Each structure stands twice: as structure tokens, then as C-alpha cells.
Image (cartoon, rainbow, N blue to C red):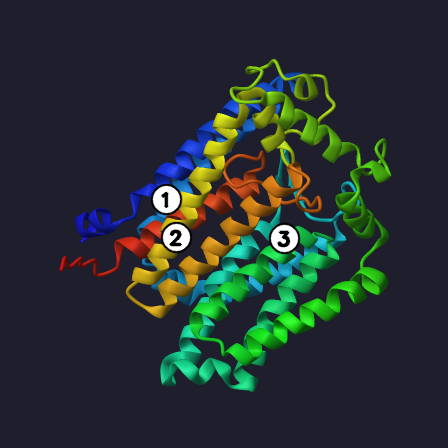
Amino acid sequence: MKKRILKNMEWWVLVCALILSGIGLIALYSVSQSTELAEFKKQIVWFVISFGVMCIVLFIDYEFIAKLSPLFYIIFLGLLVGVLFTTPVDGSSRWFDIGAFSFQPAEFAKIIVVIFLSLIISKIQVKGKDEINKPQKLFLILLLAAIPVFLVIKEPDHGTAMAFLIALAAMLFVAGLRKKYIIAVIALVIIAIPLLYLFVLPDYAKTRIDVFLNPDLDPRGSGYNIIQSKLAIGAGMLFGMGILQGNQTQLGYLYPKTTDFIYAAIGEEMGFVVAGSIIILNVVLITKAIYIAKTAKDDLGSYIAIGIAAIFFFHMMENIGMTMGLLPISGVPLPFVSYGGSSFITSFISIGLLLNISGRRQKSIFVV
């Protein structure tokens, strides 16, 4: 049984994750010199732990994991409520401090919610694919997604909340959501965006949007980070300035260089070749995840895989886009590359699930 699972697996998703992790560790070694390699050393620990957790997830049938997801969903809702009462860090209550490490429940909740909603959608569709389009059942799915999204927004962490919504949209689309609902949502979003900007978004979020549209609006304040990020990426040119040699990175102009703006540090010190390779590796990973969704043995596996693909896609687009000034700044990490234990473990759990789903499919290829 294990041999068949190992043979069927899409190993490229793991290969891409490992190469990205390697690039991230090299970058962290360079950018964490000022802290005596503290982040680099911790990330190595997280890598070992993450790889071990991935191996555990890999060999537990994803259907069994999905059956446990309602329990995990309730537990993480409790954690998302609890984290709101912790001491804010940089204006956000996102982390539980456990000794020298921090735990971010919203990162894990993304995967839990994807698995749980995949289970709910597949259960609803037992009587037929079109069951999902019945208003009361669609409302139930949206409600179950809205609760964790609301709690994450309260932290506040709008970037992670958006990742939840992107994953949900991808899952509903694959599940067969009718076009009338899709058109209605698009129209609602178009109407809601200006209203949210004028009446709902806090001042700091509005400032980020304003700075995105015009970084020179506040070059020494809100626009400072994005200006330094674009300078760093541009300075790297084709092959980079060299490890430990980046001006913006090593002189402290780039911040936070281990998390949000690590891609800019890589662009400066390793150049376009490595920075471009990160995009290619992410595209391969996401493409393989979509293929796994298409070839999964059941709807449950398809929905989990497409939800994971959507999360990886959003994180890649948002993190890399914001460092180039193409998207507003948010605290969204670059999977496998940015520093952070919660993000690292969650990313490898996702890889474990993708390998799990691909290994258990009935892989038959016919050549005509």
C-alpha cells in the first residue's frame, strides 16, 4: 500500500518546496547577521519540525484527517478568539508567546478551514453536485467561512483574511457554483471596495492603499519601506550584489527584511536569476497542486488541493507584488522563504496533504 502511495505522489511539489526552503535559509543567513543569526538558527529548527510534521500528515489518510476537521475547526475558533486578548505587537494581536517562540493560530486555521469546508461541501453534494447552489446550503458554507475570517480581521490581519476568501472562492468555483452567484459576487465586490475604503477600513489600511498608489506621498513615513524595497530589487540586477553585500539589506534600510521584504533582499543580493527562479518554482508548485485537484480520487481531495493551490497563489502574488510596488503592503509571508515557524509548518502541512491526495488517487494514464 505504501509503495503504491509513494509511486503515485507528485514529487515535484516537495522538490519545489525544498528548493524554496533552501533559498530562504541562505537569504536568512545573510539578513540575520545583525541578530547573530537568531532567525536563521530558529528557521533551521522549524524546517526540521515542519518536515517531520509533513511526513506524519503524508501517511494519514486525508479522509480521516477531514473527519477530524470539525473538532480542529472548533479548537482553532477558540484560539482565534483567545489571541485577541494577548498583548498587541506592532498594533496586532496575532501571536501566542510560548517561551522563545511564537504561535500564530491564523496560519494553521487557513488549512483547517480549507479541510473543514471541503468536507462540508462534499457532504452537501452527496445528493448531487447542484446541491451547493441551494441558497440555504450555500449560506451555511459562507457562514462557516465568515466566522474565522471575521476573527482574523479583528486581530487585525487583512492579508490572511484575504487568503481565506481566495481559497473559499476557488473551492466554490471548482464545486460548480452557478454563474449567477459568481457575477453577483463580482458586482458586490466592485460596489463594496469604495464603501469599505471610505467607511470601514482603519486609517493605517487606507494609508497603505494611498502609498501603494503613490509611494512618494510619504517617502520618509508610510512610503519608506516600499521605496527601499524597489531600490533593493533594482540594485540586484541580473546576478545580485552577493550574499552579505546588499546595501539596502545589510545597512538596515530594508525592513522587515526577514519576513515581509525577504524577496527584496533576495533580489538585491542574489539578483534576477534567483528572484525569477522563486516565481518559477511557485508557478510549478501551484500548477502541480491544480493537477492534483483535477486527478484526485474524490471531490474531497479535489477541494482540499484547490484550496491549498489558491492559498499558495495568493501568498506568492501578494508578497512578491507588494515588494515590487504592484500591490498594497500587507503582512503576508512568502511560503517556505519568509522567516516564521507558523507559516513554515503550515506550508509543509499543505505539501503533506498534496502528496497525500496525489498518492491515494487511481493514477491511470492512457496514451491514444
- Disc 3 marks which residue? 160
What kind of residue is marked 3?
Thr
Badge 3 local density, few (<14 within 10 Å), some, or many (20+)?
many
Image quadrant assignment for residue 340: top right
- Disc 1 marks which residue? 13
Tell whether 180 sits left or right of 257. left
Pointers 3 and 2 in contact (C-beta within 8 Å): no
Q: Position of residue 104 (x, y in %)?
A: 62, 47
Residue at left offset 30%, top offset 51%: 59
CA–CA distance in space, label 1 to label 3: 22 Å
- SS assignment at label 2: helix
**Position of the N terminus by quadrant:** bottom left
Image quadrant assignment for residue 73: bottom right
Badge count? 3
Residue at left offset 44%, top offset 80%: 124
CA–CA distance in space, label 1 to label 2: 7 Å
Tell whether 244 sits left or right of 156. left
Residue at left offset 39%, top offset 60%: 65
Earlier sequence position, callout 1 versus callout 3: 1
Q: Is residue 78 above or below residue 36?
A: below
Earlier sequence position, callout 3 versus callout 2: 3
**Position of the C terminus by quadrant:** bottom left
Q: Is residue 121 above or below residue 82?
A: below
Per the rendering, the mark at residue 289 is 2
Earlier sequence position, callout 1 versus callout 2: 1
Pointers 1 and 2 in contact (C-beta within 8 Å): yes
- SS assignment at label 3: helix
